[in-house]
């Protein structure tokens, strides 16, 4: 009997059930998608690192003999050492006007197991008998439409050399392929090329020597002790400080992304399932209220409390199972789509979507917990309801003047408006819960758009307001002051500003961190140092201006004195005062006047690069000359960086926001429609009575839907507050050494969120309007009191 009743109830309440199931499905979909993508990336990364032997420790130096490598191998805890010759060169890529930079990395002439091994996707390994053959990184090859057998021209040690592509490959060292100093990857203008050790060493006069080393650690090795020993060994050879794999640029980026995915997979589904629990509580409690007499009769017939509670609990679990089935389907689809997007940015040999049984069980378990929490109070009311009490209709509501009427404002309102306000005020708990659920829909939209707003603001600050140069030129090594005249004579150059950069190890008390110092000659010219409030900062008269993120890591503040060890030459150590801190958004940097940095380096007015403004009409001539200039290490174009950013934004964030818009609309529609249908079932007799008394259908519709309008209107500002709170909750996971996403939400995001929810409310209103018009007056009024 109870099973037949359950089926009838499900049929009668199918619209509300589908609305709740849709919200559950959205929560399950986000949980499954994000958690499965997280596991897919993590498992792929781990397997790739193990198979191709990603190193544990890395070090860069000026030049060391191979005998130094033998000393590295004797360090306790070291399992393997791989020495290399690494150099950045300028490439002339067919069909590309701008200068392109490549990092040449030496590999053995014959294939063998090595640290940071090469996976050859196309073509073959280099031939020892062909001196100028290279393997090109897949990202660079795809961006420039290069194929096996194509040729490139490179300036290697001031000489032009023709290189032939033997293969296209990947390395665990460059899963995220980005040039040092860049904020975004630009595969069209930066790539990695692997070349035979003997030929590359001969080209740079490095035979029997190396300038880059990778180290694998034995199980249980003391990582810190090994790094210190590597530093001591390489210090006489211009070592600039060894660092562990956690700080390697590519690996650090992937690790940060995994951390962000894991946090999102926890917080966003929690919002959806909380709303679903709210709705279940409302729906079940109101369903029980409308079935008081049925419950009384069933109890009088001998049905136990446990059987009735189980009956309603099964109906709740069925709703959750329907939502879970739909959510798993949507989650797998969304997860597959996101995995494909990640595969375009992170270059693995294979990145397959992986959905583990644990993720499915977790999703179902979390859904069941949400169902139990949402239904608990309603089930308790079923158990406590006595048959005699249930046979009587519920006590009528206590009618009293509303706040508006007590303030004397009622006379300014129509009869319908006063009725509308009374209905909302007399059910404050229901109105508050409904408004809170709708507010979460607004909050999800604000959260989804927050990433676009914050990153757009960061890019605006970094590449538009802060950088007013057209091109940034970095030299392959610091040059003397005579280079000023050479760069100024390049075709189309209108204005030049010089900078000096140096890598340092900065220490305060027991905390140490690797960072960079930039010495500037001008502070309000082409390159401006801005904080997140877009305020330009002057270089200090003495001391350094330190990034607040770096100061936070060091636990230092303005006025403190830090030790700065230069990671070049004799690695002198200087004590420098922190003149001020800078709330910037990228990197771990320190700034000082160029003159002070020259004195610290004990050198003349050398330069590391230049900020250049060029005549756009002479851009082609400028590009051609730069490609032929041996001293140029790399060239960065501001417009290209912005174009790259916009393309990445379009490929990733806009897809994510589309799904969030759909999910948030589902919440808004589900909440409003569900609340309206339940209210309609509760008030059908009242509405029918008003209709008999002479109210038109339009008046009854406006009276009923007006309540939903007031609740939605109240929910929107509450959603703005909740959305900003969710952004603040997630903001710490977006703070990395590479970038720090500001807590910034544009006004347009709030307008957009309000419009989407308003549109969802309008769609729900249309459905409710149809149900009101179908109201059978005679059937509603035939009930006995």
Image (cartoon, rainbow, N blue to C red):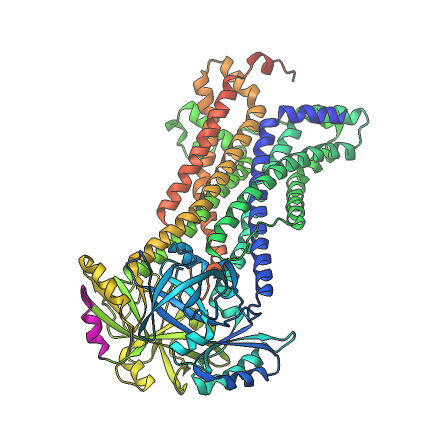
361 or 498: nearer the viewer? 498
Is 494 a magenta residue?
Answer: yes
Is residue 411 positioned above or below 461 on the image?
Answer: above
Give the left or right position of residue 229, taking residue 138 as reference: right
Image side of residue 164 versus residue 310, left or right: left
The residue at the point 31 percent across, 57 percent down is 96
Counting labels gives: 0
Quadrant of res 674? top right
Query: What is the quadrant of residue 51 in the picture?
Result: bottom right
Placement of the C terminus among the 4 image quadrants: top right
Relative to 102, is 733 on the left or the right? right
Q: Nearer the viewer, residue 143 or 194?
A: 194
Residue 506, visible in the rendered structure = yes
Residue extending furthest toward the front: 129
Measured as percent of width and height from the top left, residue 331 is found at: 57, 43
> Quarter of the image containing the N terminus?
top right
Magenta span includes 119: no
Question: Where is residue 301 shown, x and y percent of the image?
Answer: 80, 24
In the image shown, does 637 or 581 lie closer to the viewer?
A: 637
* Residue under the point 28% across and 58% down: 97
Please state the horizontal and vertical placement of residue 423, each as a whole percent of the image: 51, 29
Residue at image coords 68%, 40%: 376
The answer to whether residue 177 of the structure is visible from this angle is: no
- Look at the image and give the residue range highlighted in magenta: 482-495
For this orientation, the residue located farthest to the right is 302
Q: Nearer the viewer, residue 713 or 492?
A: 492
């Amino acid at each position: 009997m109870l099973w037949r009743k359950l089926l009838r109830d499900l049929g009668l309440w199918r619209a509300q059930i589908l609305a709740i199931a849709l919200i559950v499905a959205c929560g399950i979909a986000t949980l499954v998608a994000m958690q499965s993508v997280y596991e897919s990336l993590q498992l792929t990364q781990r397997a790739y690192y193990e198979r191709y032997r990603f190193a544990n420790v890395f070090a860069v130096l000026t030049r060391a003999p191979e005998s130094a490598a033998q000393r590295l191998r004797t360090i306790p805890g070291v399992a393997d050492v791989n020495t290399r010759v690494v150099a950045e060169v300028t490439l002339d890529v067919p069909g590309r006007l701008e200068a392109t930079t490549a990092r040449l990395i030496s590999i053995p002439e014959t294939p063998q197991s090595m640290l940071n091994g090469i996976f050859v996707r196309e073509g073959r390994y280099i031939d020892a008998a062909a001196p100028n053959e290279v393997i090109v990184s897949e990202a660079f090859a795809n961006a420039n439409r290069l194929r096996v057998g194509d040729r490139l021209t490179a300036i290697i040690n001031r000489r032009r050399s023709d290189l032939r592509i033997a293969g296209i490959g990947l390395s665990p060292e460059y899963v995220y392929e980005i040039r040092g100093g860049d904020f975004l990857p630009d595969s069209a203008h930066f790539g990695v090329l692997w070349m035979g050790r003997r030929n590359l060493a001969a080209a740079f006069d490095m035979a029997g020597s190396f300038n880059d080393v990778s180290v694998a650690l034995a199980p249980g090795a003391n990582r810190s002790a090994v790094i210190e020993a590597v530093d001591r060994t390489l210090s006489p050879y211009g070592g600039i400080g060894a660092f562990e794999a956690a700080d390697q640029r590519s690996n650090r980026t992937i690790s940060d992304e995994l951390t962000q995915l894991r946090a999102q997979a926890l917080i966003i589904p929690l919002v959806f399932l909380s709303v679903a629990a709210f709705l279940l509580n409302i729906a079940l409690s109101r369903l029980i209220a409308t079935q008081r007499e049925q419950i009384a009769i069933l109890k009088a017939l001998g049905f136990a409390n446990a059987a009735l509670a189980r009956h309603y609990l099964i109906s709740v679990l069925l709703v959750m199972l329907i939502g879970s089935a739909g959510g798993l389907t949507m989650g797998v689809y969304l997860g597959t789509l996101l995995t494909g997007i990640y595969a375009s940015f992170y270059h693995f040999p294979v990145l397959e979507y992986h959905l583990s049984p644990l993720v499915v069980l977790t999703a179902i378990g979390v859904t069941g917990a949400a169902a139990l929490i949402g239904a608990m109070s309603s089930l308790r009311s079923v158990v406590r309801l006595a048959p005699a009490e249930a046979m009587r209709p519920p006590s009528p509501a206590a009618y009293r003047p509303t706040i508006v009427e007590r303030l004397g404002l009622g006379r300014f309102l129509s009869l319908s408006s006063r009725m509308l306000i009374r209905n909302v005020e007399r059910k404050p708990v229901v109105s508050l819960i409904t408004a809170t659920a709708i507010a979460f829909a607004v909050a999800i939209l604000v959260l989804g758009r927050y990433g676009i707003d914050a990153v757009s603001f960061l890019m605006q600050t970094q590449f538009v307001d802060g950088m007013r140069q057209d091109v940034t030129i970095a030299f392959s090594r610091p040059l003397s002051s005579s280079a000023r005249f050479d760069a100024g004579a390049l075709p189309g150059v209108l204005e030049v500003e010089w900078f000096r950069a140096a890598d340092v190890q900065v220490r305060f008390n027991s905390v140490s961190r690797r960072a960079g110092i930039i010495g500037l000659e001008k502070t309000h010219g082409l390159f401006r140092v801005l904080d997140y409030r877009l305020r330009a900062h002057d270089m200090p008269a003495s001391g350094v201006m330190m990034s607040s993120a770096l100061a936070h890591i060091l636990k230092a503040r303005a006025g403190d004195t830090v030790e700065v060890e230069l990671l070049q030459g004799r690695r002198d150590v200087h004590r420098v005062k922190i003149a001020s801190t800078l709330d910037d958004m990228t990197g771990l940097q320190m700034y000082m006047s160029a003159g002070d940095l020259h004195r610290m380096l004990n050198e003349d007015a050398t330069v590391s690069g230049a900020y250049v403004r060029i005549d756009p009409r002479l851009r082609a001539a400028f590009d051609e000359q730069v490609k032929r200039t041996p001293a140029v290490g790399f060239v960065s174009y501001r417009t290209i960086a912005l174009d790259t950013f916009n393309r990445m934004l379009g490929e990733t964030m806009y897809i994510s926001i589309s799904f969030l818009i759909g999910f948030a609309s589902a919440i808004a529609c589900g909440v409003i429609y569900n609340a309206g249908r339940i209210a309609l079932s509760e008030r059908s007799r009242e509405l029918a009575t008003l209709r008999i008394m002479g109210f038109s259908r339009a008046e009854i519709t406006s009276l009923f839907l007006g309540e939903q309008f007031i609740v939605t209107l109240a929910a929107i500002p509450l959603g703005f507050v909740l959305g900003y709170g969710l952004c603040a909750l997630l903001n710490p996971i977006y703070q990395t050494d590479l970038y720090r996403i500001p807590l910034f939400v544009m006004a347009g995001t709030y307008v957009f969120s309000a419009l989407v929810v308003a549109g969802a409310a309008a769609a729900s209103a249309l459905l409710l309007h149809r149900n009101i018009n179908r109201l059978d007056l005679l059937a509603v009024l035939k009930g006995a009191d």
